[in-house]
């Protein structure tokens, strides 16, 4: 086996002289001859090796995409609001086997879909795994804020408020969006300009004060009976209050409906 024909015949089998015609000027040096043989072996080996496009590990990008898509579907749409979803980074050294099944995402029971939370992504396949991704959902909307400084005890007027775009996901004590909800209420403390108004900052103006003489309206079907009474406590609009009927001395409970008037249902 010392000629090109012998070597190729040994590699390919059969009568190499019928397959390749070798002339004197085509005979390479020993080094080049070796490369030719190695190349033939490589081609045969490559053709015999099966190829696969299935990745070995699950990409981190697919985990983020699954979590983001899940959160976008879970956030309830609210008129006039917008959301920003921020997902935390995963360790680049994380190696999770490629999941043949469709990835599934979830949030722990009781999670609030605002602010900081954790999203789980799991593989339900034959070799299951679960990974948790930190997330932050920021929700923005127009809320009522003070347009100028407000002193304690001041009555809120239309000139005192203005709607501004705020991150409402951080307003854990609530907020107002309609001017009718705050106009006429009293500030329970001093408020700087630009303060988002919350229910803790305001209280309703009292319609009835303890000791006031009040009119009691008693509805009995189609009949309305008026009587005099004495307020036993303070009450704002819609609040429940106890009063004593001046004539019968009976103590009854009603609702303050306007200044000096309490309505009871018989």
Image (spheres, grey):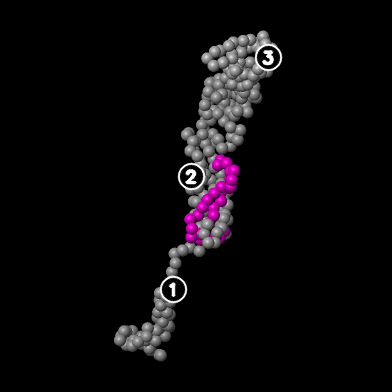
Give the x, y percent position of residue 188: 64, 24
Query: What's the distance in space between the residues labelled 1 and 3, CA to CA?
Result: 99 Å
* Residue 36 appears in the picture as rendered: yes
Query: What's the distance in space between the residues labelled 1 and 2, CA to CA?
Result: 44 Å
Tag nearer the camera, 3 or 2: 3
Q: Is residue 79 above or below residue 264?
A: below
Give the x, y percent position of residue 185: 59, 21
Judging by the rendered image, the residue that carries numbered circle 3 is 250
Judging by the rendered image, the residue that carries numbered circle 2 is 73
Dominant secondary structure (helix, strand or loop) of the stretch shown in magenta: loop
Tag nearer the camera, 1 or 3: 3
Q: Disc 1, disc 3: CB below 8 Å?
A: no
Q: Earlier in the sequence, mark 1 or mark 3?
A: 1
Q: Indicate the secondary structure of the residue bearing disc 1.
A: loop
- Numbered range of the magenta stretch: 94-123
Task: Inspect the magenta stretch and tell me whether residue 121 lies in it.
Answer: yes
Q: Is residue 228 left or right of residue 13?
A: right
Judging by the rendered image, the residue that carries numbered circle 1 is 49
């Amino acid at each position: 086996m010392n000629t090109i024909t012998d070597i190729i015949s040994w590699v390919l089998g059969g009568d190499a002289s019928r397959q390749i015609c070798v002339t004197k000027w085509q005979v390479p040096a020993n080094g080049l001859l070796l490369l030719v043989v190695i190349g033939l072996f490589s081609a045969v080996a490559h053709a015999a090796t099966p190829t696969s496009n299935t990745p070995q590990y699950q990409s981190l990008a697919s985990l983020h995409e699954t979590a983001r898509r899940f959160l976008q579907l879970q956030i309830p749409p609210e008129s006039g609001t917008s959301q920003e979803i921020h997902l935390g980074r995963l360790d680049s050294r994380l190696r999770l086997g490629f999941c043949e099944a469709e990835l599934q995402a979830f949030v722990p029971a009781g999670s609030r879909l605002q602010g900081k939370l954790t999203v789980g992504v799991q593989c339900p396949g034959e070799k299951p795994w679960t990974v948790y991704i930190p997330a932050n959902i920021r929700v923005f909307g127009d809320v009522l804020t003070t347009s100028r400084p407000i002193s304690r005890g001041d009555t809120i007027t239309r000139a005192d408020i203005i709607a501004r775009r705020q991150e409402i996901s951080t307003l854990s004590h609530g907020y107002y969006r309609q001017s009718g909800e705050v106009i006429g209420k009293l500030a329970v403390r001093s408020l700087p300009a630009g303060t988002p108004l919350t229910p803790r900052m305001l209280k309703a103006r009292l319609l009835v004060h303890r000791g006031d003489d009040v009119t009691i309206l008693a509805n009995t079907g189609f009949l309305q009976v008026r009587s005099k009474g004495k307020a036993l406590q303070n009450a704002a609009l819609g609040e429940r209050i106890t009063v004593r009927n001046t004539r019968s001395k009976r103590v009854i409970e009603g609702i303050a409906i306007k200044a000096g008037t309490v309505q009871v249902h018989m």
